[in-house]
Amino acid sequence: MRVCLASTSPARLMLLRQAGIDPLIFSPEVDEDAVGAAAEAERGAPLAPAELVLLLARAKAADVARRLPLEHPDFDGIVIGGDSMFALGGQVYGKPYTPEAARERWRLMRGATGVLHSGHSVFRVAPGTVPVEATAVAEAGVTFADDLTDAEIDAYIATGEPLLVAGAFTVDSLGGAFITRVDGDPSTVVGMSLSTLRHLAAELGVTWTDLWSASVGS
C-alpha cells in the first residue's frame, strides 16, 4: 500500500517519515489564493478558518489524485493533502514571509493562546477505480511563553525559520522552546494530525500499519 503526499512541505514530509511512512511526493498545481477568493465570492462572506483549510486541503489532494495515475498508472494507495492556518484573537494568520510581519506576529503571540487549524483530505486511489475521499479538520491550541524577550524574538526571526510556516512558528524545531502548551494532537501543529490521518485512512478501508515502509521493524 503506497502513500502520495500532495505537498512539498518539508515539515509534512518529515512528519510522515518519522511515523514510518516514506511517501511519494507530488506537487499540487493549485492557486490557493484564487480558490479561497472564489469560495468567498460565491458565499459573499469570508470563510471560517476550519472551512478554508479544508477547502484548500481538498483542492490540493483532488488535483494530485486526478494527475497521479497519468504518471503512475499502477499507483495503489492513498493521496494525502493538507493545509494549515493559525488563528489568534479572531484574526487568521498564514505565513508572514517578512521579518517585520513575523516580529509583529510574535509580539502579539507572546503570552497568548491561539488555535492551529489543519485541514486533511485523503483519497483512496487504485487502478481502474474512481478515487474516493475522506476529510476532516483537526485543531490544536497553542500557548506561547509570556517571558519571551524581544531579543529572543529577533534571534528566532533571524534564523529565517518562522517566515515560511503558518503562524510564524514551529513546535518541532527552533520555535518549540517558546511554546509552553499544546492542547490537542501535537502533530497537528507540525502540519498534519497523524491520528486524524489514521482515522481517515480507516474510513477508506486502509489499515494505518499497512502504510509503514518495509524498513520499519527490520
Image: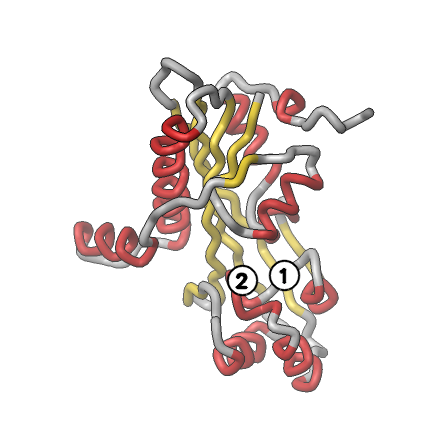
Residue 12 at x, y percent in the picture:
58, 47
Q: Quadrant of residue 60?
A: top left
In the rendered image, residue 24, in percent from the top left (x then y), is placed at 55, 35
Taking the image as shown, residue 59 lies to the left or right of residue 145, namely left
The image quarter in which residue 151 lies: bottom right
Give the residue at x 65% y 33%. Answer: 21
Front residue of 139/166: it is 166
Q: Nearer the viewer, residue 7 or 193?
A: 7
Where does residue 75 sit, x and y in percent of width and height?
A: 48, 23
Q: Disc 1 residue type?
A: Thr
Residue 187 in the image: above or below residue 133? below
In the displayed structure, 67 sits above or below 48; it is: above
Residue 17 shows which numbered tag? none
- For image coordinates 41% across by 16% down, the residue present is 127
As measured in the structure, the alpha-carbon distance from the residue carrying label 2 to the one carrying label 1 is 7 Å
For marks 2 and 1, the one nearer the N-term is 2
Query: What secondary structure is found at the residue carrying circle 1?
Result: loop
Does residue 81 appear to the left or right of 43 in the view shown? right
Q: Which mark, residue 165?
A: 2
Specify the amino acid type for callout 2. Answer: Val
- Where residue 37 sits in the image (x, y, percent)? 25, 57
Residue under pointer 1: 170
